[in-house]
Image (cartoon, grey):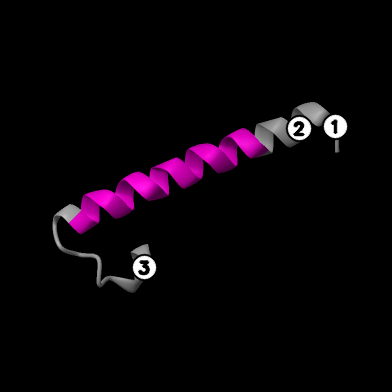
């Protein structure tokens, strides 16, 4: 795997994790933190 490919995957992973984090905090604000999907 080339360095460029690797950093692309890392970037996508970071975007995905940030998106999941956003979702989780948004749901917690609404009181959905008991939903196992967002654990």
Q: Which mark is residue 5?
A: 2
User: In the rendered image of this protein, does residue 1 appear above or below residue 29?
Assistant: above
Name which quarter of the figure residue 38 lies in: bottom left
Residue 30 falls left or right of residue 38? left
Q: Quadrant of the N terminus?
A: top right
Which region of the structure is painted magenta?
10-28
**Is 7 positioned to the left or the right of 2 in the image?**
left
Q: Earlier in the sequence, mark 3 or mark 1?
A: 1
- Residue that badge 1 annotates: 2
Q: Which residue is mark 3?
A: 37
Determine whether the residue tagged by mark 2 lies in a helix, strand or loop: helix
- Residue at image location 81% in from the left, 30% down from the top: 3
Q: Residue furthest left?
A: 30
Q: CA distance from mark 3 to mark 1?
A: 34 Å
Image x and y of residue 15, in percent? 49, 37
Residue 31 locus on image (x, y percent):
15, 63
From mark 2 to mark 3, how far is it between C-alphas?
30 Å
């Amino acid at each position: 795997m080339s360095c460029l490919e690797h950093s692309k995957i890392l970037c996508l992973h970071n975007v995905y994790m940030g998106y999941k984090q956003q979702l989780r905090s948004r749901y917690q604000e609404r009181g959905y933190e008991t939903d196992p999907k967002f654990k």
